[in-house]
Image: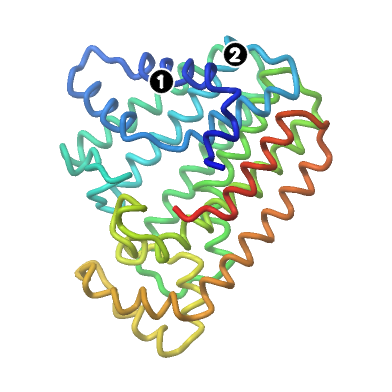
Amino acid sequence: MKLKMMYSFLNNDIQIIEDELVATIQSERELLQEASLHLLQAGGKRIRPVFVLLAAKFGDYNIQKIKNVAVALELIHMASLVHDDVIDDAELRRGKPTIKSKWNNRIAMYTGDYIFARSLELMTSVENIHAHRILSRTIVELCRGEIEQIRDKYNFDQNLRTYLLRIKRKTAILIAVSCQLGAISANVPEHIHKSLYWFGYYVGMSFQITDDILDFTSTEKELGKPAGSDLLQGNITLPVLFAMENPVINSKIRQISEQSTPDDIQYLIKEIKESDAITRSFALSDRYLQKAFKELDKLPNGIAKKTFNNVAKYIGKRKY
């Protein structure tokens, strides 16, 4: 089953979210609006807003109250992607030119800042001080994750703990908070929204590990960018860490630099795929998924729980 079919019962509300996303990034500055729309129209899985909506199904579901939280969290994610592309000097995202490649770094940075600011403006509609504290801490962690990624570019002496902390800050925490804030906005009891947080966290860790695997195992057409882009950009991911336990592969990986080209790493992609690094990475991803399912077991039965279960399984098995 395709991902979107799993939550097709939310289609009307998802369309409301899409319309709100377009409305929120409107700007009297034509260039700013054009750049923001360019990113929005590139598409995406919309995992974060979908998780907000599903989590809210455990409480007093009201799309008019919940939509601002869903839109705000997706905008924070979008803003982080714009900044990521500047840091990574990325030319493509989802098969389309990035804002920095279509315009320039300055426009990209201001666009990311604008989208980020609009998300915070939306969150002011949430009258819950606890929700704002959660979001503030999350934004701090996201920023730390971005800084750590810059710091550790082409640092081939990283360890597993460093990697896991980085993907927690860059990916997992925002998915976790999407679940938690969706639940809080629907007045869900604390013990439920805490379990939803941990479910989202474990799913988020698995999601990012799978993303990092697919960077080696998928095609450029499926990825919307060249295979091995993370390695080429100096981002040391889990398959690379495992592959580097092999001294021969280790020495070859350490030769990669900012001057390396996609052709330079084709043989390395093949060697990493033929090693046990991919299998071991999938195994760790699955361990996080199993933890997610245990948190899900604590939640009341219903369509939201069933859908969360199906989406988590999809994330663990997706091919691109």
Q: Nearer the viewer, residue 126 or 137?
A: 126
Q: Residue furthest bottom?
A: 248
Residue located at (23% from left, 29% from top): 35
Q: Position of residue 50 (x, y in %)?
A: 56, 30
Q: Nearer the viewer, residue 118 or 144?
A: 118
Quarter residue 271 falls in = bottom left
Residue 65 appears left or right of 17: right
Residue located at (26% from left, 71% from top): 257
Q: Quadrant of the N terminus?
A: top right
Q: Nearer the viewer, residue 5 or 220?
A: 5
Above or below, comparing residue 186 to residue 85 in the picture: above
The image's mark for residue 267 is none
Residue located at (34% from left, 29% from top): 40
Element type where label 1 sits in the image: helix
**Mark earlier in primary sequence (2, 1):** 1
Neighbours of disc 1 within 10 Å: few (<14), some (14-19), many (20+): many
Label 2 sits on what residue type?
Ile
**Figure colour scheme:** rainbow
Residue topped by disc 2: 63
Label 1 sits on what residue type?
Leu
Residue topped by disc 1: 21
Quarter residue 240 falls in = bottom left
Above or below, comparing residue 233 to residue 103 in the picture: below
Residue 73 appears left or right of 255: right
Neighbours of disc 2 within 10 Å: few (<14), some (14-19), many (20+): some
Element type where label 2 sits in the image: helix
Q: Are marks 2 and 1 in contact (CB under 8 Å)?
A: no
Residue 172 appears left or right of 29: right
Q: Position of residue 167 (x, y in %)?
A: 53, 54
Q: Position of residue 227 (x, y in %)?
A: 33, 62
Above or below, comparing residue 226 to residue 302 in the picture: below
